Image (cartoon, rainbow, N blue to C red):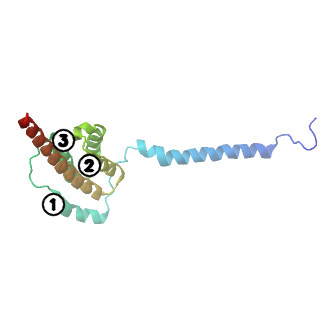
Amino acid sequence: MPDSDEQPPGRLSRVLTVARWAAVGVLLAIVTVRYVVPLFAPGQDMVVLRPEDAAIADDIKDKLVPPAQNFANPVARQLVDVGKALVANPRDRQDAVRQLYTLSENPELLGDDITTYLAVRSAYWQLRRDPELRGSFDTALLLWDAAEHLERNSAIAAASRDAMDSLE
């Protein structure tokens, strides 16, 4: 027989136990919705078009068309092509995100240039996380600058290789 101080588990303790488990379940649901679902949501790369962006978009497109320039480096050409595709269709980011991810996962394709690598990685994350239309245009400019930097560095590397070959 239990002592007079000890009470067998009653209805209140069972209710509290159920309430604790319900609170844990609610917290898990909140964490899942906040952090896990956006990773797998099909519309995560949807661009939000605000009314003021629609009027600005056409003006920005005209300014973003880069001058005709031939790039010898194939990766620099790829970066310019990705940027041009973003300017032509700023809402369609899937292919650009995929290409930038591939480039940033293989830094040797970027000539092991940390500046170009960081620019490509920044462009990737900007496309993934910035829901506004202007983010596509800013990314296109960033990719254009990265392509020019990569082209300049590969031209310098080729010139130094030629100089070293002529000395031998």
Report the Cα–Cα distance between label 1 and label 2: 27 Å
Residue 86 % position (x, y): 22, 50
Residue 148 % position (x, y): 16, 50
With 117 as the anchor, is 18 left or right in this view? right
For mark 3, give the secondary structure: helix
Three-letter amino acid code of the residue under disc 3: Val
Mark 1 is surrounded, within 10 Å at the Cα level, by few (under 14), some (14 to 19) or many (20 or more) other residues, namely few
Q: Residue at x 15, y 48 (%)?
A: 152
Q: Quadrant of the C terminus?
A: top left
Residue 8 % position (x, y): 85, 40
Q: Quadrant of the N terminus?
A: top right
With 163 as the anchor, is 39 left or right in this view? right
Nearest the eye: 37 or 167: 167
Q: Which residue is mark 1?
A: 62
Q: Which residue is mark 2?
A: 115
Q: Is residue 167 above or below residue 148?
A: above
Three-letter amino acid code of the residue under disc 2: Thr
Farthest residue to the front: give it. Answer: 167
Lower position in the chain sequence, tag 1 or tag 2: 1
Report the Cα–Cα distance between label 3 and label 2: 14 Å
Mark 3 is surrounded, within 10 Å at the Cα level, by few (under 14), some (14 to 19) or many (20 or more) other residues, namely some
